Image (spheres, helix red, strand yellow):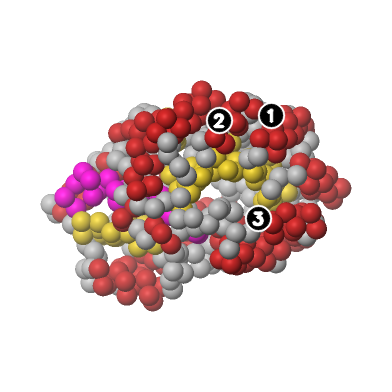
Amino acid sequence: MRVMLIRPPAKHTVESEVPAAVEAENLSYPPLAILALATYLKAHTHHEVCILDAQLDNLDYETLEAKVKEWAPEVVGITVFTVGLVDCLRAVASARRCPSVKHVVLGGPHINDFPKESVGLAGVDAVVKGEGQKPLELLLDAWEKGLTPRGIPGVVAHPDDPVPTEDVYFSNNLDDYPPLDLDLIEYNRYYDVMGEGGIFTTMVTSRGCPYRCTFCNTPRHRYRVATPGRVCDEIEGFLAKGIKEIYFVDDTFNITNKRVHELCDEILRRGLKFTWTVRFRVKGVDRPLLEKMKAAGCHRIQFGVEQGTEEGLLRLKKDVSSAEIEHAFALCREVGVRTVAYFMIGTPTERSRQDVVDTINYSIRLNPDFVMYNILTPFPGTTIYDEGMRDGVLDIQPWLDFMRQPHEDFKAQVWDEHFTRDELRDMLHMAYRRFYWRPTFVARNLAQIRNPRDLLRKATAGLRLLTAD
């Protein structure tokens, strides 16, 4: 069958109090989830597959529909995040107007959390819950044979179907999956605004996270990795295509220092020359690790700090102290690895405006190269959302209504026990202005500009941050 996998437009994203500049930065990254699916279908099945990334060219729905008609797929698969549900359904409607399209299937994080609600949405024939490679293959085979796809593990094709409680095709070994096929996308058009300006891509070397941060909905206790040899094989393939920078988007790259050391050793042994970025936990960061990472090409580490007080860190179950945070950032400066710090505003332990100001002051004292502030937006399925419902701060009903009838003016709930939404927005803007308008920050980043293109990207990103809605 001819299969088109779509990353839908981002025209009607649920207002979740994440600054537009942060969301725009995510849109500049390759669509890894559907790229992994397309790679698998191309490598292991007879089905013909292509990818349409509507966000890469900021497509409107009329153009999206025209592109679907032009390629004439029989099956359209769409990845969906909860905040992008409205856009997903508009993409479904566009696909359904194409004469060749016989079936539409959805997958992604939203489906993992809300499979029953999703399969009943207009125009949707089936949803895939969990890791989708094998279930999607079996679903396509069934549709190709004219069979009703009931009873396929991981697939829900009717509201009365049982929801899978276990991921039957879950693999503990990421080496089982084929290396990403960058020829399925226009890989040379993606970029990292905080990067070095070279041809850029993202990749995953592990999945899952064993930790229990209360605001996160990453599946627990399902952490698995690709071996260093397998990771470096994939990197070598990327470098052969001209890739110069890689952002490893593992949920947490340093679950164990041993694995990071082994991967760096393999990169160094092979003499692979590229720059790379990772997401790190603060705990366990030490000088030998950072020095080896820098030698292997790491130029930036992104830390989820979130809060600067012991009470705040404990409430979010970060399993780290403020002293450990400060030590990790100091080590990065000494070794010469750039840092990005992520902070949350409007958490349960910020009870006054001064508490929020203290968070901002802490982020400035920490002195990362970049900082990203977000207003805490608890999503259903997270521990902090359950706590909010228990305490009467949050109400699940608006979310349930939205799942059944998505609409463009829906706003995700914030933790409004102590502040209104408008007050939180004002403090978010204050945080960005205070950090990024400092003369020392401006001077440091102007000195690091390499070319006019780099200047344009960083200036655009800066304006977005400072004028974020």
Query: In the rendered structure, which disc, 1 or 2, sits on the residue that comes first in sequence?
Result: 2
The residue nearer to you, when weighing 287 against 24, is 287
The residue nearer to you, when weighing 454 against 420, is 454
Secondary element type, mark 3: loop
**What segment carries the magenta color?**
26-47
Residue 167, position as x, y percentages in the image: 35, 34
Residue 420, position as x, y percentages in the image: 76, 57
Residue 175, position as x, y percentages in the image: 33, 33
Q: Which residue is identified by label 2?
A: 292
Q: Nearer the viewer, mark 3 or mark 1?
A: 3
Residue 253 counted in the magenta span: no
Marks 3 & 1, CB-CB < 8 Å contact: no
Secondary element type, mark 1: loop
Gap in Å between the C-alphas at discs 3 and 1?
32 Å
Q: What residue do we see at 25% from left, 48% from top?
A: 41
Gap in Å between the C-alphas at discs 1 and 2?
23 Å
Residue 38 counted in the magenta span: yes
Q: What residue do we see at 65% from left, 43% from top?
A: 339
User: Which quadrant of the structure image shows residue 309?
Assistant: top right
Q: Amino acid at mark 1?
A: Val
Q: What residue do we see at 75% from left, 44% from top?
A: 367
The residue positioned farthest toward the front in the image shown: 271
Which image quarter is the N terminus in?
bottom left
Query: In the rendered structure, which disc, 3 or 1, sits on the residue that comes first in sequence?
Result: 1
Q: Which residue is identified by label 3?
A: 448
Gap in Å between the C-alphas at discs 3 and 2?
23 Å
Q: Is residue 8 above or below residue 109?
A: below
Which image quarter is the C terminus in?
bottom right
Query: Could one spot residue 223 in this view of the protein?
Result: no
Secondary element type, mark 2: helix
Please tell me the numbered disc located at residue 320. Answer: 1
